[in-house]
Image: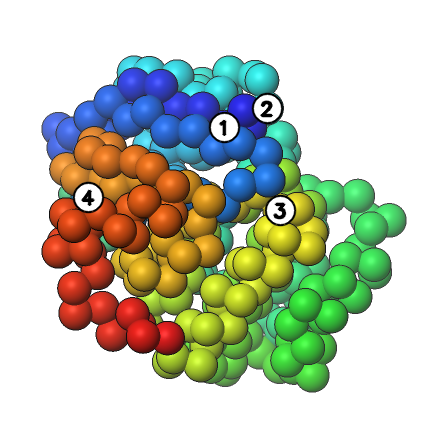
């Protein structure tokens, strides 16, 4: 097991955001977490990094208890997050953003890793000297993913990568997720509101409600589940894509 959360609770002051979450990710899997706004999906991602810290429960990554480790130590152990809203550095160029993603890595890998990212996202090669803040939303999302990959993570966390993007970019993002997993063996934990696409690329999925996991199963099972359908798939514009 690459990642295992057992009974994880998290608070923001008096707000109790995670109510005992059990979730696991195996090596080589794409696991999707879906749920309504405010369910606690982003909090779960952030709690993996100790911000906020789990108030109880246990987080084990790659055989090691990381529940109490400082954020930078968790990152060093091979978890990389593309946060909700992307948070690229807008005044830096594309190249500088990618270099920032590599600061935890071995400088000897920089050139080859840049080439890998430019192969994965050719548009970033074309725009390497452009300020990141002037990229389109879809290009910024690709940059955010590429930046996260520059640290050569074992586990990639993606928080709503398709949010706010046009259909063409949404397809590209999900294609990239599939390619990273299938061709590069990347293990991915994906948070998405675009439940249809997300469950289709996922080996397994979890449904979160009010800070708890209420349902889990294979991507296929969840897609076919009537409750999931009613709550998260009905009216999904992307269902036909
Ligand atoms: N920094 C914070 N301080 C206080 N409360 C917070 C903070 N971040 C999130 N919360 C609260 O924690 C709960 C879970 O929020 P979270 O952002 O994890 O939900 P989410 O499932 O990611 O929602 P969305 O789909 O809208 O991104 C919400 O009630 C939210 O208001
Ligand atoms: Mg969120």
Q: Earlier in the sequence, mark 3 or mark 1?
A: 1
Foreground label between 3 and 4:
3
Question: Label 1: which residue?
Answer: 3
Q: CA distance from mark 2 to mark 1?
A: 6 Å
Q: Earlier in the sequence, mark 2 or mark 4?
A: 4
Q: Residue at x 66, y 62 (%)?
A: 98
Q: Residue at x 37, y 29 (%)?
A: 23
How many residues crowd mark 3 within 10 Å: few (<14), some (14–19), many (20+)? many
Q: CA distance from mark 2 to mark 3?
A: 14 Å
Q: CA distance from mark 3 to mark 4?
A: 26 Å
Q: Position of residue 223 (x, y in %)?
A: 29, 52
How many residues crowd mark 2 within 10 Å: few (<14), some (14–19), many (20+)? some
Question: Label 4: which residue?
Answer: 39
Q: Is residue 67 above or below residue 148?
A: above
Does the image show residue 54? no
Question: Label 3: which residue?
Answer: 186
Q: Residue at x 59, y 34 (%)?
A: 27
């Amino acid at each position: 097991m690459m990642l295992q959360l057992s009974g994880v609770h998290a608070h923001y002051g008096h707000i109790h955001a995670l109510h005992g979450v059990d979730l696991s990710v195996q090596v080589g899997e794409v696991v999707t977490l879906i749920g309504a706004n405010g369910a606690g999906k982003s909090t779960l991602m952030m709690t993996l990094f100790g911000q906020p810290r789990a108030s109880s429960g246990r987080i084990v990554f790659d055989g090691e208890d990381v529940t109490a480790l400082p954020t930078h130590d968790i990152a060093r152990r091979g978890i990389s997050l593309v946060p909700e809203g992307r948070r690229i550095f807008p005044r830096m160029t594309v190249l500088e953003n990618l270099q920032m993603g590599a600061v935890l890595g071995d400088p000897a890998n920089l050139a080859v890793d840049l080439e890998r990212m430019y192969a994965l996202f050719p548009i970033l090669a074309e725009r390497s000297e452009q300020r990141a803040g002037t990229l389109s939303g879809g290009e910024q999302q690709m940059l955010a993913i590429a930046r996260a990959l520059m640290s050569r993570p074992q586990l990639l966390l993606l928080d709503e990568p398709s949010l706010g993007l046009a259909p063409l970019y949404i397809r590209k993002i999900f294609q990239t997720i599939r390619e990273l997993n299938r061709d590069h063996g990347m293990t991915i934990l994906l948070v998405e509101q675009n439940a249809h696409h997300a469950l289709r690329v996922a080996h397994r999925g979890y449904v979160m409600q009010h800070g708890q996991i209420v349902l889990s199963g294979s991507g296929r099972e969840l897609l076919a589940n009537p409750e999931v359908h009613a709550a998260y798939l009905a009216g999904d514009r992307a269902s036909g894509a």
